[in-house]
């Protein structure tokens, strides 16, 4: 789980992580309990609202600790950007609080609700995850703790772990459940899919189902041979040879391209204090190149990679690496936003260490670990038991969980797998799919089976689908604004940065 990505292809699972309002986080008083909202006023009922005489905004803002940042209009919905007071430490809630940002795409309290997280920032523009479209429901989207502005001040980084984040979700769910009383589903893609899984592991009674997309599962951090096997056969030999050739040339031409990188950094004001040197940053970008291609590109995109790297001009090599890996990724400025991710990768989540034998001895630093991307004044210690615990739980206790992976996505090399104890749960793969794999991309039989399961878990499966799951389709029509990212790519809320982060 590395590096920051500026997004390359059409990805279709989540809702955007584009940076939003300038709300700030900070220390506050002890956390207020997450109690049910009470009806506050007798304002006119919103179109599409049912079951109460109070305006939905008033009901939401009656929740202790909930505050409104802004409301944005969207036809057929109410859309709120909110902040919620959370304890820094759920084990010791009297030790201070912070403001956690979330959004609410409200359709009707009579509809099911989808709880989405990207595992990173949250967008403040209305958008809709795939499960929300399938069930035609409401959507709550939560920013992950320690991603600004949802960061305690001062920041005690030891309180950034998967259990604290799961408890954040549990408090939000508890606060909103009495307003949105119908079924709830958790979802997310990549790190968001991991987050949905961890939430289910620690609070298995909250959700009625989980849809986790392209979720890595690095059970044993020091054993990464599955990734090496993947890169030995993914795609075609011709495509692999093209990519490997460009990557080799980028290291062979470290002198002239490194000088170009220096000029690029000076023009843009980039610095390298965290990683330690421009040369380390340059190599880190190059080492990501092959992984980044398969993560976000398709086999058909091999035509854009120089066929004869040895004969290619320096500019061609630079352009190919920059478009796929992104030369700004390992600058201080590129790393800053994603420190919380690298911290988690180096303390609990794990991260790949691939060999890339085609490079020979051209690499000076190897595939650098997460510790290198986190400022040294933030202490880190890896906890090998964290992922083993989750993996064991999923294998033996998974209930109403759907995992969707892409065949050509390197992150799927180490994935969640179901054991004998799993119930009504599925792992499905999109043929030729990348890190944007979703239910819509599955083969027809799997697509219908997955869609029917989501509808059933949400409690909204039509009678025809209950009788014949092959008839299952999303209940809501495609919306060109809600279901397409702000940068024009459908669905997935991956950060608009280049690199190799899940």
Image (cartoon, helix red, strand yellow):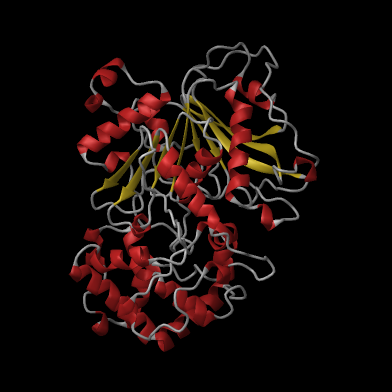
Left or right, 456 with reference to 160: left
Position in image of residue 126 (x %, y %): 49, 37
Q: Nearer the viewer, residue 139 or 340?
A: 340
Residue at the front extreme, as displayed: 420
Position in image of residue 195 (x %, y %): 51, 46
Residue at 22% in and 79% down:
308
Q: Nearer the viewer, residue 90 or 368?
A: 90
Left or right, 242 with reference to 91: left
- Vertical relation: 314 (above or below) 301: below
Quarter of the image for the C terminus: give it.
bottom left
Query: In this orientation, does residue 449 appear?
Result: yes
Residue at 62% in and 48% down:
145
Left or right, 324 with reference to 122: left
Residue at the bottom extreme, as displayed: 255
Position in image of residue 361 (x %, y %): 37, 86
Position in image of residue 37 (x %, y %): 67, 22
Residue at 44% in and 57% down:
218
- Vertical relation: 181 (above or below) 302: above
Left or right, 360 with reference to 18: left
- Vertical relation: 385 (above or below) 168: below
Residue at 66% in and 71% down:
376
């Amino acid at each position: 789980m590395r590096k920051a990505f500026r997004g390359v292809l059409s990805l279709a699972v989540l809702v955007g992580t584009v940076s939003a309002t300038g709300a700030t986080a900070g220390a506050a008083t002890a956390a207020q309990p997450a109690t049910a909202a009470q009806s506050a006023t007798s304002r006119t009922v919103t179109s599409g609202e049912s079951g109460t005489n109070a305006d939905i905004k008033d009901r939401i803002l009656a929740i202790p600790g909930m505050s409104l940042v802004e409301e944005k209009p969207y036809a057929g919905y109410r859309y709120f950007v909110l902040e919620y007071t959370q304890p820094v430490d759920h084990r010791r809630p009297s030790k201070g609080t912070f403001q956690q940002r979330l959004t609410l795409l409200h359709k009707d309290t009579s509809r099911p609700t989808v709880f989405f997280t990207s595992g990173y920032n949250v967008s403040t523009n209305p958008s809709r995850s795939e499960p929300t479209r399938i069930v035609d429901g409401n959507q709550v989207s939560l920013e992950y703790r320690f991603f600004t502005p949802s960061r305690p001040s001062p920041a005690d980084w030891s309180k950034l772990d998967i259990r604290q984040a799961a408890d954040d979700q549990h408090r939000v769910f508890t606060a909103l459940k009495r307003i949105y009383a119908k079924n709830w589903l958790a979802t997310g893609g990549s790190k968001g899919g991991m987050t949905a899984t961890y939430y289910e592991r620690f609070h298995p009674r909250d959700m009625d189902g989980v849809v986790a997309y392209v979720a890595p599962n690095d059970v044993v951090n020091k054993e990464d041979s599955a990734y090496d096997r993947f890169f030995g056969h993914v795609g075609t030999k011709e495509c692999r040879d093209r990519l490997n050739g460009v990557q080799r040339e980028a290291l062979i031409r470290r002198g002239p391209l490194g000088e170009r990188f220096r000029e690029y950094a000076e023009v843009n004001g980039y610095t390298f204090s965290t990683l330690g040197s421009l040369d380390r940053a340059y190599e880190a970008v190059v080492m990501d190149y092959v992984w980044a291609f398969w993560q976000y590109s398709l086999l058909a995109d091999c035509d854009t990679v120089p066929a004869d790297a040895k004969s290619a001009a320096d500019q061609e090599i630079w352009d190919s690496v920059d478009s796929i890996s992104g030369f700004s990724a390992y600058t201080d400025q590129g790393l800053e936003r994603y420190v919380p991710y690298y911290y988690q990768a180096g303390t609990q989540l794990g991260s790949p260490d691939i060999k890339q034998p085609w490079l020979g001895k051209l690499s000076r630093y190897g595939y650098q670990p997460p510790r290198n991307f986190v400022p040294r004044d933030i202490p880190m210690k890896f906890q090998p038991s964290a992922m083993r615990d989750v993996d064991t739980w999923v294998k033996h206790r998974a209930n109403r969980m759907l995992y969707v992976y892409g065949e050509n996505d390197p992150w799927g090399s180490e994935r969640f797998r179901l054991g004998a104890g799993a119930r009504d749960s599925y792992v499905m793969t999109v043929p030729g799919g990348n890190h944007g794999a979703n239910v819509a991309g599955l083969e027809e039989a799997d697509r219908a089976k997955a869609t029917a399961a989501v509808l059933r878990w949400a409690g909204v499966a039509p009678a025809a689908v209950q009788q014949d799951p092959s008839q299952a389709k999303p209940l809501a029509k495609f919306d060109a604004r809600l279901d397409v990212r702000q940068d024009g790519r459908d669905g997935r809320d991956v950060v608009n940065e280049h690199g190799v982060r899940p």
